[in-house]
Image (cartoon, rainbow, N blue to C red):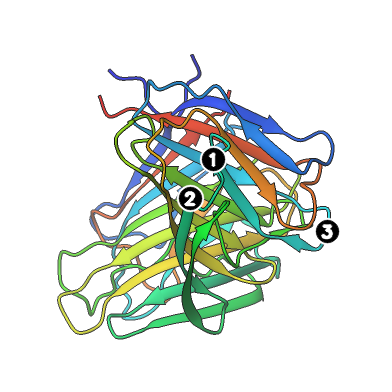
Amino acid sequence: MANTFIKIASVAVGAGGAATMVFSSIPATYTDLVVKVSARSTSSSGDCQIVLNGSGGTAYSGKLLYGDGAGALSASNSGVAQMSWGAGAINRSTTTSSTFCNTDVYIPNYTSSNFKSVSTDSVEENNATQAYSQLAGSLWANSAAITSITLSPSGGGNFVQYSTATLYGIKNS
Amino acid sequence: MPKTYEPIATTTLGSAQSTVTLSSIPSTYTDLIIISQPKSTATEGIVYIQFNSIGGTSYSSTYVYGSGSSASSGRRTNSGLGVIAENAYATSTAGATTFVTQVFNYANTTTFKTWLSRGNRTDSQGTEAMVGLCRDTSAINSVSFAIGGTTFAAGSVFSIYGIKAA
């Protein structure tokens, strides 16, 4: 019986916060990867971005569909150095205290020689007029197998204490 | 400990095909998750889904879609095939299109079947969420995929997993 949806690693941010949450030395033994994120940022702006294999450059692009409590909107970018919405929305310092985002990131065929696409579903709830629900698709135009995933708040600042991220491996055989 | 998120079937195309079928799906799980990365032999093509070869006018679906500049929603009814994304087409760029499709309570023989799908095509087009309905009460034992106006290219990947509630 295949070992699937197996926890590879988890990160829990301690007192003092952390600028990044990093999964490194990801084994090539699975088919797909899933990252579950519960996080909050010290910044008053921004989302939660992803960089793969520590590679910046201009190989990332993304499409975003989101609701802010008042309407449905869409945005995109390309030729950027990170998946700007790869790990979705994140609760910022201005949102309801003790509230952390919930984000599900799916990365299929992460060891293939194809470009890598990422599917992200995320909520950042806030007991105020504005909060965010996000769906995003991101692409890394690179054929390398994914060996590391770095999450960081795009608005600068740190992840606050009790932010967590867990990486799972899914195997199709 | 229940066995859950178990691989049921997977296929990676070695050559171009117009349809792909994952069959002999057991009724031993609660829900299904289908992960697909179809690649088109043409520039692009819409990806259809069909359960148990059910056709007629059994399918309907509703989407919400972000193009990168605007958001939209629409639906289709009384269709002979379901769709897993109305706007996020499969593309000829390998790996650029990803679909995550969940089919709930697929083995029951009382209710019509529904699915929830997330589609992303990030080299152009956009990101999408889709809900669909197949008005048939039979347990799902096969899932087929087709692509509009073209064929799936070699390297297209389709995998199906079983989720068990208990």
Between circles 3 and 2, the one closer to the viewer is 2
Q: Reading the chain from its start, which is encountered first: label 1 or label 3?
A: 3
Residue A127 x/y as whole percent? 15, 75
Q: Which of label 1 and label 3 is nearer to you?
A: 1
Q: In which quarter of the image is residue B106?
A: top left
Q: Mark 3 points at which residue?
A: B42
Secondary element at tag 3:
loop
Q: How many C-alpha atoms fall within 10 Å of the one at disc 1: few (<14), some, or many (≥20)?
A: some
Q: At 70% across and 70% down in the image, what residue appears?
A: A58
Disc 3: host chain: B
From the viewer's perspective, is A143 left or right of B83?
A: right
Q: Check the image and report above or below for B29 versus A102.
A: above
The answer for how far apart the CA atoms under marks 2 and 1 are is: 7 Å
- Indicate left or right for B143 with A100 as reference: right
Whether marks 1 and 3 lie on the same chain: yes
Cα distance between the residues tagged 3 and 2: 28 Å
Q: Which amino acid does label 3 sit on?
A: Ala
Could you say which is closer to the camera, residue B157 or residue A23? Answer: B157
Q: Which amino acid does label 2 sit on?
A: Ser
Look at 57% across and 52% down and name the residue there: B80
Identified by mark 1, the residue type is: Ile
Mark 2 element type: loop
* Residue of label 1: B54
Same chain under badges 2 and 1? The reply is: yes
CB contact under 8 Å: marks 2 and 1? yes
Residue bearing mark 2: B58
Residues tagged 1 and 3 counted as in contact (Cβ below 8 A):
no
Residue A141 is marked as none
Q: Give the answer, above or below, for where A6 lies relative to B67.
A: above
Q: Residue A156: name its quadrant.
A: bottom left
Residue A25 makes an appearance in the image: no
